[in-house]
């Protein structure tokens, strides 16, 4: 019953949520913290 629910912590194979422990496969998420983007640009691109 508990195994039916895919946990992002237990199942790192499924790239459902960007975990800080695993490698950042998402270029969008990686570019935000990696590069110091300004406030207006960050908000415009995200929103």
Image (tube, rainbow, N blue to C red):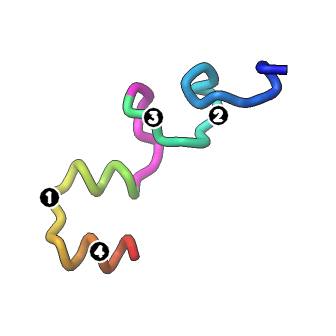
Residue at position x 14%, y 58% in the image: 36
Query: Disc 4 to disc 3, how far (Cα)?
Result: 22 Å
Q: Secondary structure at mark 3?
A: loop
Decide whether the magenta segment is chiefly helix, strand or loop. loop
Q: Which mark is residue 14?
A: 2
At x 75%, y 29%, the residue is 5
Q: Name the element at disc 1.
A: loop
Q: Residues within 10 Å of mark 1 (few under 14, many from 20)?
A: few
Mark 4, other Cα within 10 Å: few <14 / some 14–19 / many ≥20: few
> Nearer the observer, disc 3 or disc 1?
3
User: Which residue was labeled with disc 3?
Assistant: 19
Residue 43 is left or right of residue 38, and the answer is right
Q: Position of residue 47 (x, y in %)?
A: 40, 76
Image coordinates for residue 28, horizontal then vertical, percent: 39, 57
Q: CA distance from mark 2 to mark 1?
A: 28 Å
Q: CA distance from mark 3 to mark 1?
A: 20 Å
> Which residue in the structure is indicated by mark 1?
36
Residue 9 falls within the magenta-colored stretch = no
Residue 12, position in %: x, y? 57, 26
Q: Residues within 10 Å of mark 2 (few under 14, many from 20)?
A: few
The answer to which of 44 and 31 lies nearer the viewer is 44
Q: Foreground residue, 36 or 47? A: 47
Q: Quadrant of residue 13?
A: top right
Say whether residue 29 is left or right of residue 25: left
- Give whichever of discs 2 and 3 has the lower sequence position: 2
Residue at x 64%, y 28% (from the top left corner): 7
Q: Which residues are magenta?
A: 21-27
Label 4: element kind? helix
**Horizontally, is 16 left or right of 27 in the view?**
right
Q: Which residue is mark 4?
A: 43
């Amino acid at each position: 019953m508990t195994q039916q629910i895919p946990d992002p912590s237990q199942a790192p194979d499924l790239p459902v949520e960007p975990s800080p422990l695993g490698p950042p496969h998402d270029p969008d998420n990686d570019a935000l913290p990696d590069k110091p983007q300004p406030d207006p640009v960050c908000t415009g691109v995200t929103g």
